[in-house]
Amino acid sequence: MANSPQAKKRARQNERRFAVNKARRSRIRTYLRRVEEAIASGDQAAAQAALRAAQPEIMRGVTKGVLHKNTAARKISRLSARVKALSA
């Protein structure tokens, strides 16, 4: 348990950051799920639109420190490849 005033303040700050980051991660996962569902339905137009909506959200996660840059790039790359494969 935190005893010093500084440690108590840090604990409060950590709780707030945790809540914000958790909400951000959840939001990103929602966008990813929408793309996955569109791909599963086989609708390329819907999948393309969902991917276009998800990309900025994923990259925002990078700038806010929720995701690593390479992780985001990998997710976007793999999703776009799957969306592109729907047309073939």
Image (spheres, grey):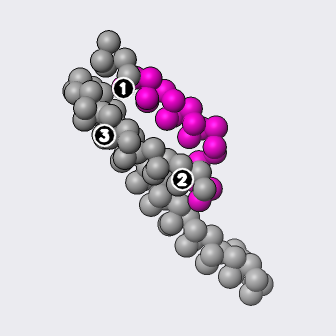
Instruction: Residue under label 3, please give it.
Output: 49
Helix, strand or loop status at disc 1 = helix
State which region is magenta: 64-83
Of the numbered discs 3 and 1, the one sitting upstream in the chain is 3
Q: Tell me if residue 67 is in the magenta stretch.
A: yes
Amino acid at the residue labelled 1 = Val
Above or below residue 10? Residue 75 is above
Quadrant in which the C terminus is drawn: top left
The residue under the point 45% across, 44% down is: 55
Helix, strand or loop status at disc 3 = helix
Q: Main secondary structure of the magenta part?
A: helix
Q: Tell me if residue 78 is in the magenta stretch.
A: yes
Q: Callout 3 environment at 10 Å: few (<14), some (14 to 19), or many (20+)?
A: few
Instruction: Residue under label 2, please give it.
Output: 61
**Label ID, residue 83:** 1
Decide which of 5, 63 is in the foreground and name it: 63
The residue under the point 25% across, 32% down is: 45
Where is residue 40, by image quadrant?
top left
Where is residue 33, by image quadrant?
top left
The residue under the point 62% across, 70% down is: 14
